[in-house]
Amino acid sequence: MKITAVQPFYLKMPQITDAADGTQDTLLVRVCTDEGIEGWGECDASPLVSLAAYCCPMSHGNIINICESLIGETLDSPKDVLRLHEKALRNGLDIQQIHHAYSGADIALWDIIGKKLGEPIYRLLDDSSDSIAYSKLPYASVLFGDTPEATYQIATCLREQGYRAAKFGWGPMGKFGEENDIALVRAAREGMGQDAQLMIDAGVVWGTDHETAYARAKQFSPFSPTWLEEPLSPDAIESYGALSKRNPPVPIAAGEGSGTYRMAEDLILHGGIQFVQIDVGRIGGITVAYRVRQLAERHGIQYVNHTFKSHLSVAASLHVFATNESFDLLEYPAAGSELSQNLTVERLEVAADGRVRLTDTPGLGVRVDREAMRKYLVPVRIQVSDREIFQSLDL
């Protein structure tokens, strides 16, 4: 089977705000083959910057775009997916967003191979036809309200929807002093109830200030959060290490900002985190995320997906760790944009028992809704001098 086309699509909501909401726009990637099998993937990064990595003219041997690396290549087995991952990243060595951008293509390639071989991706990753996809407990991933009162209302609504776990993040956290921070967490706990799992995402607000992060962990501990997420900057490895050495009363989670395997490895080996959260649309796709899962297993820490995109990304993320029963939590975007909610025909719905499951459908197990795509598709045309290097396709 040969790759015949690699096609990025830029989608966005009519209005973009400065809220920390990654569902407002996205970059989808379709990979086509000469056997008529196509795969889809999604990137979680600045869409137009990532799109450039698919079409930028060659500067030299270390700046060759993704399309040139893939089109015409053979794709018949998981080994080809791994080989092409290495080739594309080597060819794009000096394209700084290459890992983010390639995530979409990598997910699409796994989708194709799963469809060709008649297997869900999780079985191909484990290289076992006997692999079981365990159900996961979804935690509703939402932003803090602008006030504690608004946060309480959001939490109450989630509880009424049946969520048994929820994560509140970003918004006003860390911006208006410790009393407001504590009030936000208290409101989230009261709204969710005492039996629910509660996660707190500080949104990197304290930079390298591990002292404040430790203080907040102590102040939040009476509300029994499952973790305090990203209290520090993604690359503040020494500060994470210093924080962890103090043994804070709330476990520390981080990793969504890891754009490469090495960044995630550094957090695990030297940051002392207890939950590593990997975004399959940022780190280079399913291929790299699965490597981080294996690293987490070897070091006895919990792997959790980071997903604040569409159900295409939710499915890709879940395939990575579905076969590990002890990795039980699934970040589940519960309040994303219409774009993110409507992008796929199938959704990974929360079942009556409050859990989410993959099916045995080959590939990702979800399909892109092209009619929904048309509603949000933004035409892009890139021209250099008199040469057109990219033109959006009409679905």
Image (tube, helix red, strand yellow):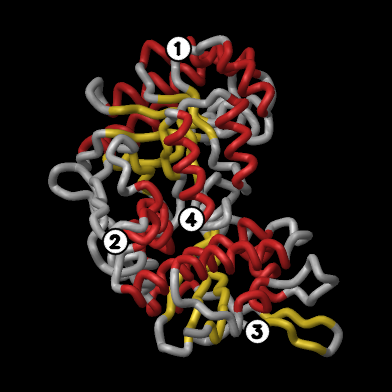
In 3D space, how far apart are the residues under numbered discs 3 and 1 (Cα atoms)? 53 Å
- Amino acid type, residue under disc 2 in the picture: Arg
Q: Which residue is under mark 2?
A: 347
- Is the C-beta separation of discs 4 and 3 under 8 Å? no
Label 3 Cα neighbours within 10 Å, binned few <14 / some 14-19 / many ≥20:
some
Question: Which of labels 4 and 1 is toward the front?
Answer: 1
Residue 249: mark: 1
- Amino acid type, residue under disc 4 in the picture: Thr
Looking at the image, residue 319 sits to the left or right of residue 280; the answer is left
Mark 3 and mark 1 lie on one chain; the one further toward the N terminus is 1
Mark 4 and mark 3 lie on one chain; the one further toward the N terminus is 4
Mark 4 and mark 1 lie on one chain; the one further toward the N terminus is 4
In the foreground, 6 or 73: 73
Question: Which of labels 4 and 2 is toward the front?
Answer: 2
Judging from the image, what secondary structure is the residue with disc 1 in? loop
Q: Which residue is pictured at 65% across the width and 69% down the height?
A: 51
Q: Which residue is under mark 3?
A: 391
In terms of image quadrants, where is residue 370? bottom left
In 3D space, how far apart are the residues under numbered discs 4 and 3 (Cα atoms)? 24 Å
- Amino acid type, residue under disc 1 in the picture: Pro
